[in-house]
Amino acid sequence: MIIERARIKSNCEVAHNIWEMHYEAPNIADSYLGAGQFINILALDDWSHPLRRPMSIASAEDGCISIIYKIFGDVTKILASQKEGETVELMGPLGNTFSNWDNGTYPVLIGGGVGLAPILNLKKECAAKKVDHTMIIGAKSGNEHFIEHEPEENIYLTTDDGTIGDEGTVMEPLKRIIIENKNTYLFACGPEPMLHAVREFALKNNIPAQLSVESYMGCGFGLCQGCVIQRHNYEIRDDSYHQKYSLICLDGPVYEAGDISFG
Amino acid sequence: MIIERARIKSNCEVAHNIWEMHYEAPNIADSYLGAGQFINILALDDWSHPLRRPMSIASAEDGCISIIYKIFGDVTKILASQKEGETVELMGPLGNTFSNWDNGTYPVLIGGGVGLAPILNLKKECAAKKVDHTMIIGAKSGNEHFIEHEPEENIYLTTDDGTIGDEGTVMEPLKRIIIENKNTYLFACGPEPMLHAVREFALKNNIPAQLSVESYMGCGFGLCQGCVIQRHNYEIRDDSYHQKYSLICLDGPVYEAGDISFG
Amino acid sequence: MKRGILVLADLKITIGSEVFQNPIWVASGTFGYGTEAPELVDVNRLGAIVTKSITRKPREGNPPPRIVETPSGMINSIGLANIGVKKYIQDMLPIYENLTTKIIVNIAGTDVQEYVEIMEMMESVSSVIAGYEINISCPNVKKGGMEFGVDCDMTAKLTEKLRILTERLLIMKLSPNVSDIVSIGLSAENAGADAVSAINTVVGMSIDAESGSSNIFTTYGGLSGPAIKPVGLAMVHKLYNKLSIPIIGMGGIVNTDDVVEYMMAGSTAVQVGTANYRDPGIGEDIIDSLDSFINQTNRKSATDLIGSVRTLS
Amino acid sequence: MKRGILVLADLKITIGSEVFQNPIWVASGTFGYGTEAPELVDVNRLGAIVTKSITRKPREGNPPPRIVETPSGMINSIGLANIGVKKYIQDMLPIYENLTTKIIVNIAGTDVQEYVEIMEMMESVSSVIAGYEINISCPNVKKGGMEFGVDCDMTAKLTEKLRILTERLLIMKLSPNVSDIVSIGLSAENAGADAVSAINTVVGMSIDAESGSSNIFTTYGGLSGPAIKPVGLAMVHKLYNKLSIPIIGMGGIVNTDDVVEYMMAGSTAVQVGTANYRDPGIGEDIIDSLDSFINQTNRKSATDLIGSVRTLS
Ligand SMILES: Cc1cc2nc3c(=O)[nH]c(=O)nc-3n(C[C@H](O)[C@H](O)[C@H](O)COP(=O)(O)OP(=O)(O)OC[C@H]3O[C@@H](n4cnc5c(N)ncnc54)[C@H](O)[C@@H]3O)c2cc1C
Ligand SMILES: Cc1cc2nc3c(=O)[nH]c(=O)nc-3n(C[C@H](O)[C@H](O)[C@H](O)COP(=O)(O)OP(=O)(O)OC[C@H]3O[C@@H](n4cnc5c(N)ncnc54)[C@H](O)[C@@H]3O)c2cc1C
Ligand SMILES: Cc1cc2nc3c(=O)[nH]c(=O)nc-3n(C[C@H](O)[C@H](O)[C@H](O)COP(=O)(O)O)c2cc1C
Ligand SMILES: Cc1cc2nc3c(=O)[nH]c(=O)nc-3n(C[C@H](O)[C@H](O)[C@H](O)COP(=O)(O)O)c2cc1C
Ligand code: FES
Ligand code: FES
């Protein structure tokens, strides 16, 4: 884990309320292991917001990393106000990565909302290793999408309101793709209800799936014990510690769907 | 009292750590009564620093007002980072003004540190009314001065280290000027030790003097009762309220030297 | 919201026999006597004005410095500077005749007798005031300077004595500087209070590292502002779980979300304090946006919010 | 500072029979067992590491959500997740042999017997630990869930029992959620504690206005960070005025000025808590700049700061 003062290379709104920021962060980019990992951002030097903000790494190349973020509250608003040339302190790379997508299975990459950040990244990694795959990205409405619906390229968009791509959630194209392709492996990141649905679907249909999950994080590197998710199958032993709850910042954010449970 | 969203017209460092900011604030400029009055600035929209920051009005003309401020802590640092075109919420004009300087006496204007803001302003008012006067401005060192030492123009600078103007405090030229001129009236604004010295001097030598004083302010308009200064002569009566302590934001910031006491 | 039709939410709330036009009040000590607000504020829109604490005799208050900012908060030690009940009755009560907002008079004393005398004097004249808020965070001279508000028995006794004297609203204002605010709230309830309000300021201190001095003349002062919001919310929620009388919540409220949170935690009404110093019109702004919030979240009235927080355990 | 000569200030402080290389410690629960710090941190520079609370049995802790940010602060409800004393003795104590910084083991229990058993187990093995900090902000199951730390008698009894078991440093960690922290501190002192530390977290609550839910699974959690600094300073200063044993101050420390203020208020040492999450190297940074501060202000040693605040009244 590295703490690095990074220079902002660019920071633009790419869709409604969704921004993309590029940082010059050679040390973090260097240590980066793959899609799924995240950074923890110190957006303001003062202590009015004591905690850093975790953001998935959306790309890491040539000494630079990028994030894709949505304006949610105070700190993401501040992120959006930051200008090229300013510097920000980043901590990373943190967490684990998606894995086994290059093991002969057919990866189906599923992103929802800003959960598309690591998914876009994984797509690039698939392309680089020439692994055939499909990607599905869901959003509430068309104005939150900034990539194209290209079924011929195996890129499917969905919107709740049908303004772009398929109307409905990512589950609709997913169901079709599962039928059309053999040996699929799902890789998903997005809001909890989406992950929930993917998980249920995967378990029911016996399809392997990895989910990148989120939680409020106090530190991002294992000190605070704040970022837990409940494991699905855990032994309740007398000396049970980290059996029932797993630290997302260290053990995650990527889990096999069967290993975790959404309360 | 007016609350007005003001546009920043300019914001520059005029001396070491000392900045001058111009705001477009037509309503406040319009209601402005004279040197001594101040505004209360909301430098950040968030609530990490709940209180506004009071700053003397250094000029008010053509719908614009200006302040001269020193970087002290968090909020003045933020002020210095603000850029032309940004808007800030100002409250003002607040407080009373220097008075009676145009009543046939010879005004000696004395400013220390950023206390020169209302003094420069008063100087302009004297000039406009063609009232002969002298001005003395003190600072720790030459790099904190941004006006010229021009004895021929009756402008005297002093520095603690002698780098510009007279070495020592404002008291040195003051003593000379008092001898050289008749019928003097002192008008002073600056750090408490300076005001203290001016007050002692004025009372001892029976010279009328007005002092603009500072205090931590919770509101700036009489609600919080936080900004008190002790009166010099007060009756301790059974129903004493605001007899012993005066609210600087309403009754001040300008007081006759004999009316207040520095603890 | 239907287009073209301004749907005004029902913001009315009731405490005892009093109906308030909305739950947004201004807190004692942060809005003067209700008569000093700048012209730009329409005090008649507020749910109620709680006046700064009135004492038996006028008080000059503490020597300066009385105020200092802290992270997301401030400390004050004003020392109950006020004109005293006599002058208050003379000068202020007549002005209230012309206000349509409700006035709650906050009373402070250093022994039970003092509170009683003030209340008797207030009740001996005719006035439009709606009720009293009793500040029990004052040092009790008879009990060695310990606050009334940290002791159940003292709270009960004081409440009883005052209850006899008035049919107007009697609201006991609780101190957060206690091990168990619920027992004290229950004492007030059992002794006849119509409501409790919480929280008063949290004891705090501030030092200037450079000069080595205390930033407050009296060394300790009262911490207020957003910093204490989590403390206020916890105490209001605990009170709501055990008391039957309404709770008036406060501590760090600066926007509509804060009001909603305080009401969800169990407040029937709320008080805006420190935020008035920065923006004396903030109460009005919050009333407007609370109105929109209630409409937009398809609630029927402000009262739907009270105690509605969904706890997870 | 003389040009060309690096004058290192004397940062040493003493508590009981232990000399600490500097007064900057890291707080329980904010630095793990002292063994998880990232490589970029040199833990051996710290005055001491206070480990996260150890309980008799391992604990999984509370369900999520466990953490939420608040204005200038955060609330946590981790629920004392820890490996338990047995595994701690097995796995951690050996690692400490290789550290030169001092280790203070924080202990938590739900009845006196539990604290006693943990201490007995710890004392039954040889180890390099310097002492114990006793977390008495835990709900006491035998007393209906009331915290040990709100009651003088419980505090005294617990201190006595533990005092008998160890000659190492015994530090009682006080809760701020009390009417009178000084009496509790005095009870600990009279029962034989070597020092008290203050403050633990302040009870707080956080609600999401939009969803209407509690942001913390257990509804209430502990508020920490700069928001509570004024509270910590006030309590440390009150303790310093009445106690003879050293006080270890904490609550919202994020920089050197904060450390200086806590020492001026009466702390012999301080603990950095929440700030470690944002910057695990902050303790080291503060040590360096405390060194400069002491030199630049012409003080001889860190101990000159202790209790030196100039009060005005
Ligand atoms: C591993 C991980 C990866 C993430 N990747 C992305 C991403 O690529 N793009 C993106 O837009 N968002 C991502 N998030 C979520 C992002 O961290 C929050 O949106 C952000 O912290 C909101 O901050 P705020 O101050 O704007 O909002 P706030 O007003 O503080 O909160 C809004 C919501 O954001 C969440 N949040 C706030 N602080 C934290 C914190 N310290 N840790 C975790 N969640 C928090 C809470 O759920 C809260 O309800 C990720 C979160 C995690 C844990
Ligand atoms: C009537 C009046 C007129 C003033 N005019 C000027 C001026 O023309 N130029 C100038 O540079 N400064 C002026 N000041 C002082 C100015 O308000 C402070 O320097 C400023 O508030 C510091 O804020 P900060 O956050 O940078 O510093 P902080 O770190 O908050 O504090 C540094 C010091 O500033 C003072 N201060 C902080 N907050 C307030 C407040 N709300 N009210 C009063 N004092 C405070 C305190 O004494 C404190 O010790 C004036 C003050 C008053 C009361
Ligand atoms: C400067 C100041 C003066 C106050 N004076 C009083 C008072 O006279 N009587 C009282 O009961 N509470 C008084 N309070 C407490 C407030 O009414 C309120 O309980 C507290 O500030 C918490 O709310 P807030 O965080 O919104 O300010 C005062 C608070 C401040 C900041
Ligand atoms: C996430 C978290 C976990 C904590 N765990 C413990 C603990 O296990 N035992 C304990 O005595 N104090 C614990 N504390 C309290 C801290 O040690 C400290 O008393 C408090 O946080 C105040 O200091 P701060 O404001 O610097 O964080 C914890 C604090 C936090 C934020
Ligand atoms: S975020 Fe702190 S342990 Fe995971
Ligand atoms: S600053 Fe509030 S009364 Fe003067």
Image: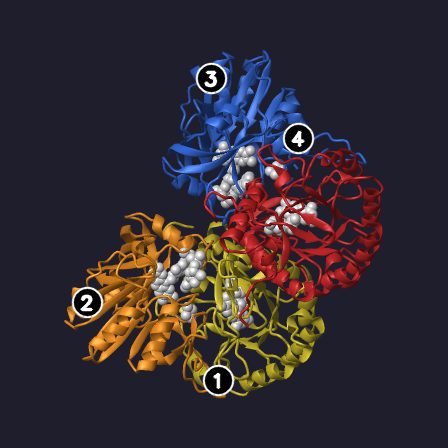
Chain colours: A orange, B blue, C red, D yellow
Residue type, label 2: Asn
Residue type, label 1: Ile
Q: Which image quadrant shows ligand 1? A: bottom left
Between disc 2 and disc 1, the foreground one is 2
Q: Quadrant of residue A117?
A: bottom left
Disc 3 from disc 1: Cα separation: 80 Å
Q: Disc 2: which chain? A: A
Above or below for D260 versus A212:
above
Between disc 3 and disc 4, the foreground one is 4
Nearer to me, D145 or A114: A114
Between disc 3 and disc 1, the foreground one is 1
Between disc 3 and disc 2, the foreground one is 2
Q: Position of residue B64 (x, y in %)?
A: 44, 26
Q: Disc 4: which chain? A: B
Q: Which residue is mark 4?
A: B260
Q: Which residue is mark 1?
A: D89
Residue type, label 4: Ile
Q: Which residue is mark 3?
A: B154
Disc 4 from disc 2: Cα separation: 81 Å
Is there any visible trace of residue B74 in the rendered image?
A: yes
Secondary structure of the residue carrying numbered label 4: strand
Q: Mark 3 near mark 4, Cβ–Cβ under 8 Å?
A: no
Residue type, label 3: Asn
Is there any visible trace of residue D306 in the rendered image?
A: no
Q: Position of residue C288 (x, y in %)?
A: 54, 45
- Mark 2 residue crowding within 10 angstroms, few (<14) / some (14–19) / many (20+): some
Above or below for A227 versus C196:
below
